[in-house]
Amino acid sequence: MNQTSANRQTPTDRQLQVRVASAQYDISFFNSWDEYSQKITRWVNEAVANGAQLLVFPEYGSMELPSMLGEDVLQDMHKQFAEMQTLWADVQALHLALAAEHRLLILGASFPLLMDDGSYRNRAVLYGYGEDGEGCVLGFQDKLIMTRFENEHWQIAATDEIQLIETPFGKIGINICYDSEFPLLANQQVTAGANIILVPSCTDTEAGFYRVRIGCQARALENQCYVIQSPTVGKAEWSEAVDINFGLASIYTPVDYGFPANGILAQGEVDKPGWVYADLDLTAIENVRNNGQVFNYRDWPLQSKKSLADG
């Protein structure tokens, strides 16, 4: 478990209330960088106008970037990854500037980032701001467990490093899409102090979406924490990578006193682009762990003490 935070931002007084915005993000076709920049800025401005302090964009939302790189790039998936690297610095600069301008946190859409060893990692970066007012990278998470498609077609490499990110709202963990389906990953982050898990996702079928959704709800239930899911939505027939996208954004909670009976604080409409908002009370997490009907989080270690009886 690695803990990361911005060198210029070490908050001592945690903010116990946070308004989150989870994107149902459509994949666009761009003719220029300016068009992409305008879209991201427009989305951020809309969230800011609605009071959001933590914005979550989805997995592989960055795969709209190759649209501006020419037809020959679009015809070759691996060429897309290679050419996208020329835009990475600009992508970071844009998100840093917006985080600084509005003094908020932005989980940027995950990006297939080239590593020094020639492999690619599916990386989600959390941007924030420092005490000096400048934008900064609070931390990042590379995807931990790869789907068959990523392994067999895209050759995206997994990491084995689970990150925990310090923020003004306490520690935050990130589970990228498929990672949310494996309970020990989020549990390690929550055990180390995270009360919020961000789940950027990208799924092309209803079954894929519901696998992630069910995983998110299970993680919120068993860890008694908040889980925020942000998916890609709609069709982008020009893109080999993200041509079909199905999902809806949701904010999940524990299922207990003070929380919705179904564990869903807010959710959007299927495949409709836009933000889904919710207000998180971080004191409620501590309260339910201490005074809830059940103690899922506290009782987690008990399962390791049980064993299958011989017939």
Image (tube, rainbow, N blue to C red):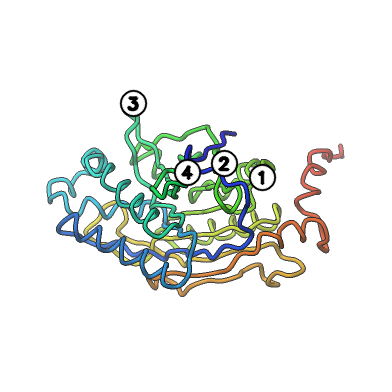
The amino acid type found where label 1 is placed reads Gly
Residue occupying the point 53% across, 71% down: 267
Residue 130 or residue 267, whichever sits in front: 130
- Distance from label 2 to label 4 (Cα)? 10 Å
- Distance from label 2 to label 3 (Cα)? 23 Å
The amino acid type found where label 3 is placed reads Asp
Q: Where residue 97 appears, x then y in whole percent?
A: 33, 52
For label 2, the residue is 164
Q: Is residue 65 left or right of residue 230?
A: left
The amino acid type found where label 4 is placed reads Leu
Identify the element where label 1 is drawn.
loop
- Distance from label 2 to label 1 (Cα)? 8 Å
Q: Is residue 94 above or below residue 283?
A: above
Q: Earlier in the sequence, mark 2 or mark 4?
A: 4
Q: Earlier in the sequence, mark 2 or mark 1?
A: 2
Q: Quadrant of the C terminus?
A: top right
For label 1, the residue is 193
Residue 138's tag is 4
